[in-house]
Amino acid sequence: MTIRPLGLDPTHCLIGGVWRAPASGAGLPLHSPSDGAEICRIARGDHEDIDAAVRAAGSALTGPWGHATAAERGRVLFRIGQMVLEQVEELARLEAMDVGKPLTQARADVLALARYMEFYGGAADKLHGQTIPYLEGYTVYTLRQPHGVTGHIIPWNYPMQIIGRSVGAALAMGNACVLKPAEEACLTALAFGEIARRAGLPDGALNVVPGLGVEAGAALSGHGGVHHISFTGSVGVGKRIQQAAGQNVVPVTLELGGKSPQLVFADADIDAALPFLVNAGIQNAGQTCSASSRILVQRRVYDQVLNGMAARYAALRAGPALDDLDLGPLVSPRQKEIVEGFLAKGADLEIAAQGQIISDAPAGGAYVAPTLFADVPPDHILAREEIFGPVQVVIPFETEEEAIAIANGTDFGLVASVWTESGARQMRLARQLRAGQVFLNNYGAGGGVELPFGGTGLSGHGREKGFEALYGFSVLKTVAALHG
Ligand code: ADP
């Protein structure tokens, strides 16, 4: 089987508006998580291609893209969004096949990508500078300007959503982007590059160079011609990217995952909570930075919540992405091995419930049955480390203080949610929980294109999504005029 996203040759990179083979001519196999078969080959871009892409982006900044007005940038983003909407089924199938996610979830990602283009298209001409009252005879004002060339190193779990939130915001502010998608899943990144080209985005404003992290990724994060780097991925690689960017004193936005808790108090509407408690853990087979992997439950309702979650787990089914069940496979045999390693470390724990892998799931697929652990001590490795698979731990607590201490007791701080009918407790916890986003009586809030997102601690720093991202993808300049 050879896939041609939107008719493209997937062994090519998009550099300066032209699809071309990488300079080395080298390729990499892309495998289907659902059955292990090779889907196609992709480009193995390296430092030469990254260098060409950074140069092309630099040229775009002095060409038509650099001269486009904010309104024109917005308009082209809208056109991209419109064309994404015209390709929902094709893009969803590509993402499902490539990432292994159920088709319905992939379709939601396409819609989110379109929505990001609309949001940032609409925002492009809405970010203004200020005038600042100053000394007699001066006029002082600020300008919001693009960084210049922005590097975007993205993971395989939500390619379209992450392209939407980072490339969308960067383009809105007038940056020129070099996108390095993950070697495990890059087909929709290629398709997006082609859509942007067809929508009339000027040459070089978006370049797409697939390749290995240690080759293309490292070349991009250390390139002297890059002025800002946005990275979503693992903590280990995030540290390396920050170091590489540090050599060039380049700002980075890091989104590195989490161990996000949901706190369920005895006064909560538990029936309303249950679907959120489970879905936030098993969406995309748990391979979600903002997955909720810890469920903290007040002792008085512990059995009720655990039993409710266990009943839902028992009904979960995992199978090939295109079968569109509750869960697909994990992205790769390597990821499956990592998750199974964690499950083995939970051998001392009680399994409250597991879902099923359907009996005719292909043997070559990276399937893991979703697993719910009960009564997990907060200091257990499964309660502290990010697993990135369909595994949740349930932890009992007695008091609000204890719940806060457990919730804040990991090295991460990305998302948290609180289930309680007490408004005062909602307000207290929203302040005290260590997280970039806190949800009250919900989790995830409908995708949240408009909602600033990012972490603290090992979850990273900087904010993407929402209007806030536009500040991160621009630089403030102060202009002081002495005119008497
Ligand atoms: P995961 O462990 O979930 O696969 P990674 O953090 O390894 O996530 O990968 C996320 C992205 O970072 C991918 O695009 C990958 O190619 C890239 N990457 C991996 N290693 C490096 C590196 N040393 N320098 C720059 N990018 C890298």
Image (spheres, grey):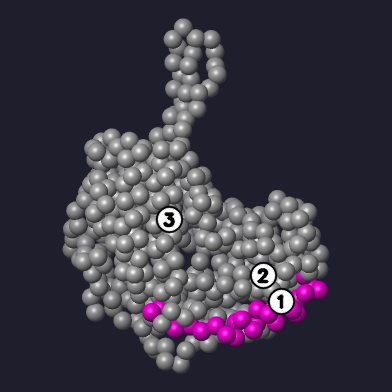
Q: Residue at x 77, y 74 (%)?
A: 301
Q: Viewed as shown, does residue 140 lie left or right of 209?
A: right
The percent position of residue 376, horizontal first and vertical second, equals 69, 75
- The amino acid on which the numbered mark 3 sits, given as a three-letter code, is Arg
Question: For the magenta stretch, what is the residue range?
Answer: 298-322
Tell me which label, 1 or 2, sits earlier in the chain.
Answer: 2
Is label 2 within 8 A of ligand 1 (CB to nearest ligand atom)? Answer: no
Give the residue number, with chain letter if any, for mark 3: 115
Q: In this rendered view, identify the residue nearer to me: 157 or 131.
A: 131
Mark 1–mark 3 contact, CB under 8 Å? no
Q: Quadrant of residue 475?
A: top left
Q: Closer to us: mark 1 or mark 2?
A: 2
- Helix, strand, or loop for circle 2? helix
- Graded by Cα atoms within 10 Å as few (under 14), some (14 to 19) or many (20 or more), the crowding at tag 3 reads many
Tell me which label, 1 or 3, sits earlier in the chain.
Answer: 3
- Graded by Cα atoms within 10 Å as few (under 14), some (14 to 19) or many (20 or more), the crowding at tag 2 reads many
Is label 3 within 8 A of ligand 1 (CB to nearest ligand atom)? Answer: no
Q: Residue at x 54, y 13 (%)?
A: 135
Mark 1–mark 2 contact, CB under 8 Å? yes
Q: In this rendered view, identify the residue nearer to me: 401 or 358.
A: 358
Residue 189 appears anywhere in the view: no
Alpha carbon of mark 3 to alpha carbon of mark 2: how far?
Answer: 27 Å
Alpha carbon of mark 1 to alpha carbon of mark 3: how far?
Answer: 35 Å
- The amino acid on which the numbered mark 1 sits, given as a three-letter code, is Val
Establish if 95 lies above or below 358.
above
Tell me which label, 3 or 2, sits earlier in the chain.
Answer: 3
Give the residue number, with chain letter if any, for mark 1: 305
- Graded by Cα atoms within 10 Å as few (under 14), some (14 to 19) or many (20 or more), the crowding at tag 1 reads many
Give the residue number, with chain letter if any, for mark 2: 273
Q: Viewed as shown, does residue 327 lie left or right of 90?
A: right
